[in-house]
Image (tube, rainbow, N blue to C red):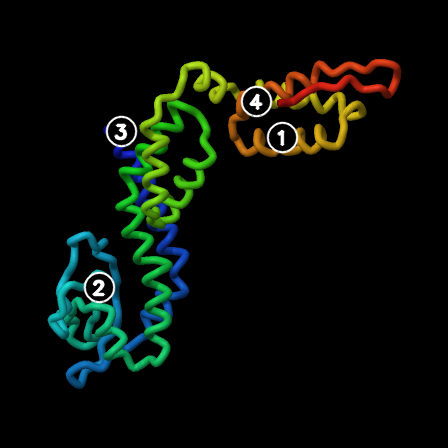
Amino acid sequence: MNNMSNINDRIKERQAEIEASGMSYWQKIAEFQLEYEGKRWKLVHTYDTGGHGKYETCQLCGHFPCRYMFVIQHPATGQTKTIGDECVVKYTVDTKAKDVLRRYRTQVTKRVADLNENKPMIVKIEKWIRENGYNGFLNSILYQLWEGKRLSEKQVVATNKILTQEIPGETKEMRNKSKTEQENLIEKAIRKDETLNDWERSFLRSVAEQSKSGRILSEKQITVLERITKKRFEDGDTRKKISYV
């Protein structure tokens, strides 16, 4: 229950951040006035029903289904109506309304609704990462989901394939090596900088950045690091050949 409550709170916080990022659009939209039945109405609220069978009817034209809804209010009487975005464009007296509404719908209302739809997949991926360690692909998918973006069919298939894959115990142990252990190993390798070739220096820079970002090194990367720390020379500048494959 606590985990579900936590994810719901985090989603609400992220939705608020997305809405705040679109305030410049909403400020423009809030200034729009709609000419209807000889009255001037103002936009006071907008929301996305989320689709997937969740639609509403426009109270101006009667059109159904409508996904993106806008609440308009008459300044004098306080009367409100909930209408679809097509009627907003049709009745607004602002010629730029269509473009601004399209941008707001894409950048804000759609993302807010889709973030809620993304919750089940977010929960699955975060659980998998907690149990199995870092995965670059899943991390990128998780970022996309938290941005309020929907996954493509191919992304869903690839994600589910990883989530249902059985991870060998030894691989889990390697993935869960502590960040401190990684940094210590990298530090030892860097101490031998004067003895490294260009490829080795490039490799060390790469894994150092990976470790700083919180990512877990692969078993092969750990093996290469260990070999670099054990390097020795023969006859001055003559280097022993060590295979990293």
Q: Residue at x 24, y 62 (%)?
A: 68
Give neighbour class at mark 1: few <14, some 14-19, many 20+ (Cα, 10 Å).
some
Q: Mark 2 points at which residue?
A: 69
Residue 163 image position (x, y, % from top left): 34, 30
CA gap between label 4 and label 3 equals 38 Å
CA gap between label 2 and label 3 equals 33 Å
Q: Mark 3 points at which residue?
A: 2
Q: Which mark is residue 220?
A: 4
Secondary structure state at the residue bearing disc 2: strand
Q: Nearer the viewer, mark 2 or mark 3?
A: 2
Quadrant in the picture for the C terminus: top right
Secondary structure state at the residue bearing disc 4: helix
Type of residue at label 1?
Answer: Ala
Q: Name the residue under label 1.
A: 208
Type of residue at label 4?
Answer: Lys
Type of residue at label 3?
Answer: Asn
Q: Nearer the viewer, mark 1 or mark 3?
A: 1
